[in-house]
Image: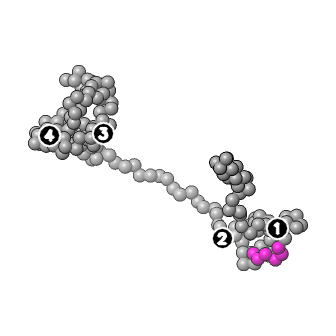
Amino acid sequence: MEETYIDSLDPEKLLQCPYDKNHQIRACRFPYHLIKCRKNHPDVANKLATCPFNARHQVPRAEISHHISSCDDKSCIEQDVVNQTRNLGQETLAESTWQCPPCDEDWDKDLWEQTSTPFVWGTANYCGNNSPASNIVMEHKSNLASGMRVPKSLPYVLPWKNNSLEFSLCYCLS
């Protein structure tokens, strides 16, 4: 019995395809082959049923009930079910001793005590009072050199992208 069990686990063992008797497939590739061959042979696939205990078992529909009652893989699954039901009664969950750490944060208080204004590129905010209610821009100052301004929108085509486009168009038309 043990030799048969070890033999069935050999990944290099050749198995015969149930869809095409000429196919000899290594055991490690057999599940993938079954899926492929099932699609290629739908007429044979309609005549076969899949074992509920092992998807590698493709049995004629008329014999599926007999196969289910005598399938070797059935005993493994039944043993797993028995073991799980035994373990349910024995398992007791240990109560957790974890406690939430104390929270020292007060975001509302931090907002009122905030000493700096939020950073905005290209502008500076000046306020005498640091409260959120008076967080208004009193003076607008640009950090850009005189005669320069911040663009109102980004260009749709970047200059370095535009040049390569012209080059590729010229190259294609040549």
Q: Earlier in the sequence, mark 4 or mark 3?
A: 3
Residue at image coords 20%, 38%:
58
Q: In the rendered image, which residue does mark 4 sit on?
A: 60
Q: Secondary structure at mark 3?
A: helix
Which stretch did the figure color magenta?
135-140
Q: Earlier in the sequence, mark 4 or mark 2?
A: 4
Q: CA distance from mark 3 to mark 2?
A: 63 Å
Residue 147 visible within the image:
yes
The reply, left or right, for residue 141 in relation to residue 43 is right
Q: In the rendered image, which residue does mark 2 sit on?
A: 108
Q: In the rendered image, which residue does mark 1 sit on?
A: 149
Q: Earlier in the sequence, mark 1 or mark 3?
A: 3
Q: Are marks 3 and 2 in contact (CB under 8 Å)?
A: no
Q: Are marks 2 and 1 in contact (CB under 8 Å)?
A: no
Res. 36 mark: 3
- Camera-side residue of 87 and 47: 47
The reply, left or right, for residue 29 in relation to residue 52 is right
Q: CA distance from mark 1 to mark 4?
A: 80 Å
- Camera-side residue of 138 and 56: 56
Q: Amino acid at mark 1?
A: Arg
Q: Amino acid at mark 4?
A: Pro
Picture colour scheme: one colour
Q: Position of residue 15 (x, y in %)?
A: 25, 28
Q: Earlier in the sequence, mark 1 or mark 4?
A: 4
